[in-house]
Image (cartoon, rainbow, N blue to C red):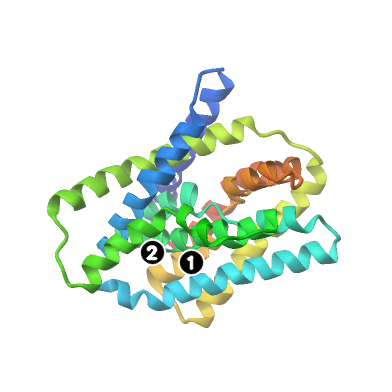
Amino acid sequence: MIAELFNVIAPVFVIAFIGYIWIKKGYDFPSDFVTRVNMNIGAPCLVFSGIINLGDGLFEATDFIVASFISILSLMSVSTLFALIFKLPLRAYVIALYSTNSGNMGIPLCLFAFGERGMSLAIAYFALSAIFQFTAGLFISHGNLTASSLTRVTMLYGLAGALFFILGDVEAPKWLINTTKLMGGATIPLMLLTLGASLARLKLENTSKMVVISAFKLVMGISIGFTISLAFGFTGEERNVLIMQCSMPVAIFSYLLASQYNRSPNDVASMVFITTLMSIVTVPMLLTYLM
């Protein structure tokens, strides 16, 4: 079990650590360029490839998608309540606490732990989470939301393309499947390298306070993942992926929003860094239980 667990976890943390060390050594890492490539090309290809891989099983995954939607709403609701009770800056803390790093960390972890179908379900959760980030997340942080914000959710284009072939009962061209699979596969290590590079640039502040809040965030995510999966009667990959995705650390994107709109960016940066460090302990514990 220990060897199997190590084989799942090591690739994720090793690649992220390479990105971290790369920055600490003073080498150039074009994060903006890599992020643009990932978001505009890699992520849509990853979503297309993952949904196509589900095929007709997409209809069987409807309950999982609904459960993912409810899980994200639950994370947001509990985060809002927590911020209100403890009188924390609402716009900053809600966007951080409800978010999960379901892309950079969640997808590769689910791939290595639960196989191709696990990765496809993780991609479905990630796509739904991205829609929340570019709509509700933007509204919370900026206080404004327009219909054009949905055009920034590039994963929707990959999803629409996959649905065209699945719902139309049309076989996707082999060259398209191979291209998106290749580009989507390249996106995963790039995500992990970018995660490590981003963590290396973050600065910790109010450490003791942030440790407590970060611990709450992870416990909240794990609890909601278990509760929703139990309520839906999930077993196998659906249960495991939902719990894993809900329990991921604070997403890097929440720091970008906090920084752009000046919503306590240092606090959010600390939460990103600390929850990611904590996940080195929580992820193995979860996988030991789930695998």
- Crowd rating for badge 2 (residues with CA inside 10 Å; few <14, some 14–19, many 20+): many
- Specify which label sits upstream in the sequence, 2 or 1: 2
Residue at left offset 53%, top offset 35%:
196
**Observer-nearest of 278 and 47:** 47
Residue 84, quarter of picture? bottom right
Q: Is residue 205 positioned above or below 147 on the image?
A: above
Identify the residue shown where x is 26% and y is 62%.
52
Name the quadrant containing residue 273.
top right
Q: What residue type is labelled 2?
A: Leu
The reply, left or right, for residue 96 in relation to residue 55 is right
| Residue 147 visible in image | yes
Q: Mark 1 points at which residue?
A: 242
What is the x, y in percent for residue 262?
A: 74, 43
Element marked by disc 2: helix
Q: Quadrant of residue 119?
A: bottom left
Of the pair 220 and 153, the residue shown nearer to us: 153
- Label 2 close to label 1 by CB (< 8 Å): yes
Q: In this view, does 44 lie above or below 87?
A: above
Residue 131, image x, y percentages: 50, 61
Q: In the picture shown, does residue 96 fall above or below 7?
A: below
Horizontal placement of 61 versus 276: left or right? Answer: left
**Amino acid under label 1?**
Leu
- Is residue 185 left or right of 171 when viewed as pictured? right
At horizontal 36% and vertical 74% (from top left) the residue drawn is 61
Q: Out of 161 and 96, give the one closest to the viewer.
A: 161
Q: Could you give the CA–CA distance between mark 2 and mark 1, rounded to whole angstroms?
A: 8 Å
The location of residue 146, given as percent across then percent down, is 57, 60
- Residue 121: which numbered mark, if any? 2
Picture coordinates of residue 264, whole percent (x, y): 76, 45
Quadrant (top left, top right, bottom left, bottom right) of the C terminus: bottom left
